[in-house]
Image (cartoon, helix red, strand yellow):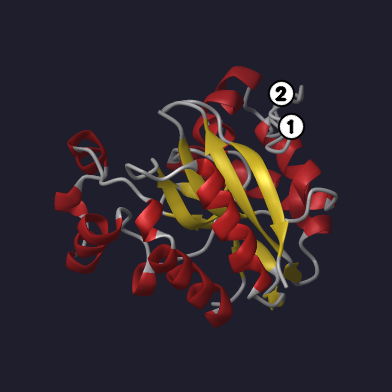
Amino acid sequence: MPRYAIFFVPLAEDPLNSAAADWLGRDVFSGASVARPSLVDGIDLEQFDALTASARRYGFHGTLKAPFALAEGKSIEELETKLEAYCKTLKPFTLPRFEVGQLGAFFALRPSEPSEPLKRLASNLVQDFDAFRAPLEEKDIVRRNPDKLTKSQRDNLFSWGYPYIFDDFRFHMTLTNPVPDALAPAFHSALVAHFASHIEEPREVLSLALYEEPEQGGFFTVRRQIRIG
């Protein structure tokens, strides 16, 4: 069963996307693999691929509305139509400059400071598109380790299908799997070197992207990128 998500990704022609494809080894717009060597000193390509595998599967993105299967009676055509109309009601806004950071053991690009417009957009998308979301299956709930979540995160998971929303929202664009502590300094240095020239300036949110996963466990690609405003 396919799943869909509403994500942020820069416009297709933005060089940041090319840099991300070179890092992850896959272009999220075309779905094509991108040949590249290990970009981290002292780590061979096999290990580099393994430590970027999950980020490669999801593709370069920042989560606004997390992946969901369509609710019974809903179609992808309806979802696309609503998202097109929704985007017309929005106005572009500017994000703080990105920087390389960590969430736990994961590395990601993160805004250098919180963005209230982005948090508000994500919160609205979670609520306004919830009618399209099928209820989570038990295996999906178990995968989230609810016993390890905070109360608000558990409430979010059971009510809205994803823990990290509303006050628990932390926008990021994931670039690695969990990285062992011993390798973290090398990964941090490599990421800063690879992305530095692409994240010097603030970036505008000019569109929303509808991502598609053809079957659970498959690779996500951009199905539609829709300009806002």
Q: In this view, does 139 lie to the left or right of 205?
A: left
Q: Is residue 174 left or right of residue 15?
A: left
Q: Position of residue 62 (x, y in %)?
A: 57, 55
Q: Can residue 108 be seen in this view?
A: no
Task: Measure how far apart labels 1 and 2 are at the Cα level.
Answer: 9 Å
Q: Can residue 227 be seen in this view?
A: yes
Quarter-wise, where is residue 21 in the image?
Answer: top right
Where does label 2 land, which residue? 33
Q: Which amino acid does label 1 sit on?
A: Ser
Q: Nearer the viewer, residue 145 or 132?
A: 132
Q: Which of 198 and 120 is in front in this view?
A: 120
Name the outermost residue toward the left. Answer: 147
Q: Is residue 54 left or right of residue 209?
A: left
Where does label 1 land, which residue? 30
Q: Is residue 166 left or right of residue 47?
A: left
Position of 143 relative to 25 (above/below): below
Q: Where is residue 74 in the image (x, y as percent from the top left)?
A: 41, 45
Name the outermost residue toward the front. Answer: 73
Quarter-wise, where is residue 111 in the image?
Answer: bottom right
Q: Is mark 1 on a helix, strand or loop?
A: loop
Q: Position of residue 182 (x, y in %)?
A: 47, 39
Q: Nearer the viewer, residue 124 or 191?
A: 124
Q: Which residue is drawn at 52% across and 42% down?
A: 76
Q: What element carries label 2?
A: loop
Q: What residue type is labelled 2?
A: Ser
- Screen quadrant of the N terminus: top left
